[in-house]
Amino acid sequence: MQDRWSRSIDYLRLSVTDRCNLRCRYCMPEEGVRRLAHEQILRLEELERLARVAVRLGIRRIRVTGGEPLVRKGIVPLMARLAGIAGLDDLAMTTNGILLGAMAPELKAAGLQRVNISMDSLRPERFRAITRGGAIDAVWAGIDGALAAGLNPIKLNVVVIGGFNDDELVDFARLTLVRPIHVRFIEWMPMGASRCSGIPGCFVGVGQMEQTLMEAGLRPEPVSPVRGAGPAAYRRLPGALGTIGFIGALSQHFCAACNRLRLTADGHLRPCLDGPVEFDLKGLLRLGVSDRQLAAIFRRALAVKPAHHEMITEPWKAHARQMSQIGG
Ligand SMILES: Nc1nc2c(ncn2[C@@H]2O[C@H](COP(=O)(O)OP(=O)(O)OP(=O)(O)O)[C@@H](O)[C@H]2O)c(=O)[nH]1
Ligand SMILES: C[S@@+](CC[C@H](N)C(=O)[O-])C[C@H]1O[C@@H](n2cnc3c(N)ncnc32)[C@H](O)[C@@H]1O
Ligand code: SF4
Ligand code: SF4
């Protein structure tokens, strides 16, 4: 599929729940978000049907996300349903890893190929603070379980926040020397519950992150991208088992190479992470429309996909959906 800016779109991010077992401060408000009622969430067979329509149109990669996808009832059978779609090349998940230790073998057996795990601090107390209560040991168990189950590659997502975890960049980078893990440093984005704007030093650009590594004597060298379809630019420390990726969503935005669409847990197709535009696929689906009519909505979403986000010119929109509702 091509959008009106001649970008090739082959990646669908599928949010399978708006619920989460953590409350990361930059993502969700403490009280959580108003939970969708059971019937507002796409059912497993509806998710599968929409995924099939998307793959028929040219989607080749699906990333399951949330909220926390592993708290979604039926997540393992869902992975099996998605893995069974002919034409899909890449089935991945973004998770906080808390439940992954126990679930990795069954997810792998169902057809999940790889996971990206979010972990913003290596220090247990800090981790507990940023997630409002999360236990870092559970995430380590998730990482070990994923490695043991053969999910590959394994990437760690680290949102870098000045004054909170920017003093851990070197520790995270050194992790790649001893473990086959790909650490990606992510710029904070002004979405949902996040309010870095206006707090001096809170936003850390990828240039500054690289500078911090250089000042510590680390000289990561550019390498070709690790398997995946995301926007990270990858580097490797000499002799390292894993790589270091940088996701400069604001300072070096990658919208010109955008390859994706998103489906929210309540069945709305979003042309872009940013902005209010959505198409209610679930409503149509439940009216009994044909696959061809559903496909027409995918094409409409492509037709209005913006050239880029507006997060710099219009920082933080109070009315916007939370990041956890969109799936990141
Ligand atoms: N601005 C922007 N940020 C995105 C987009 N997609 C993902 N991100 C952010 O990039 C970070 C990493 O996303 P992941 O869910 O791990 O997925 P990915 O990097 O596309 O995955 P790979 O296929 O493994 O490269 C998260 O913080 C996302 O919110 C996007 O389309 N636009
Ligand atoms: C919304 S989470 C959903 C999946 C899963 N619960 C997890 O945390 O990996 C997806 C990704 O979005 C990132 N994210 C959330 N809010 C963000 C923000 N304001 N800026 C940048 N990344 C953000 C998270 O760090 C995570 O890597
Ligand atoms: S980043 Fe992921 S784990 Fe953290 S609150 Fe958001 S959805 Fe939950
Ligand atoms: S912000 Fe929008 S246009 Fe830019 S990469 Fe993300 S989805 Fe694509």
Image (cartoon, grey):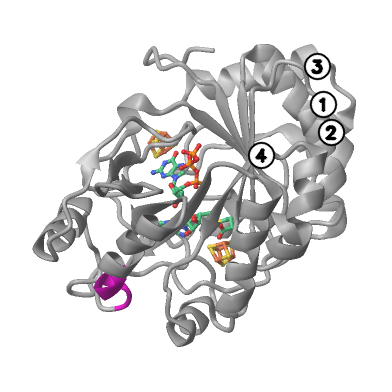
Image height of 324 relative to 155, above or below: below
If you read the primary sequence from the N terminus, does the residue marked by circle 1 or circle 3 appear first? 1
Residue count near mark 2 (Cα–Cα under 10 Å), binned few <14, some 14–19, many ≥20? some
Q: Where is mark 2, residue-wise?
A: 81
Q: Which of 111 and 19 is in front in this view?
A: 111
Q: For ligand 4, which image quadrant applies?
A: top left
Checking the image for residue 291, the label placed there is: 3
If you read the primary sequence from the N terminus, does the residue marked by circle 2 or circle 4 appear first? 2
Looking at numbered disc 2 in the image, what kind of residue is underneath it?
A: Arg
Image height of 216 relative to 149, above or below: below
Checking the image for residue 268, the label placed there is: 4
Does residue 324 show up?
yes
Secondary structure under the numbered disc 4 in the rendered image? strand
Q: Where is mark 1, residue-wise?
A: 84
User: Which residue is the extreme one toward the bottom?
Assistant: 125
Q: Give the magenta range.
A: 164-168
Secondary structure under the numbered disc 2 in the rendered image? helix
**Left or right of 298 in this view: 285:** right
Residue count near mark 3 (Cα–Cα under 10 Å), binned few <14, some 14–19, many ≥20? some
Does residue 265 show up?
no
Looking at the image, do the residues carrying marks 3 and 4 touch, with CB atoms under 8 Å apart?
A: no
Q: Nearer the viewer, residue 326 or 216?
A: 216
Q: Which residue is drawn at 47% across and 68% down?
A: 193
Looking at numbered disc 1 in the image, what kind of residue is underneath it?
A: Gly
Residue count near mark 1 (Cα–Cα under 10 Å), binned few <14, some 14–19, many ≥20? some
Pair 1/4: label in front: 1
If you read the primary sequence from the N terminus, does the residue marked by circle 2 or circle 3 appear first? 2
Looking at numbered disc 4 in the image, what kind of residue is underneath it?
A: His
User: Residue 118 location in percent, x, y?
Assistant: 51, 60
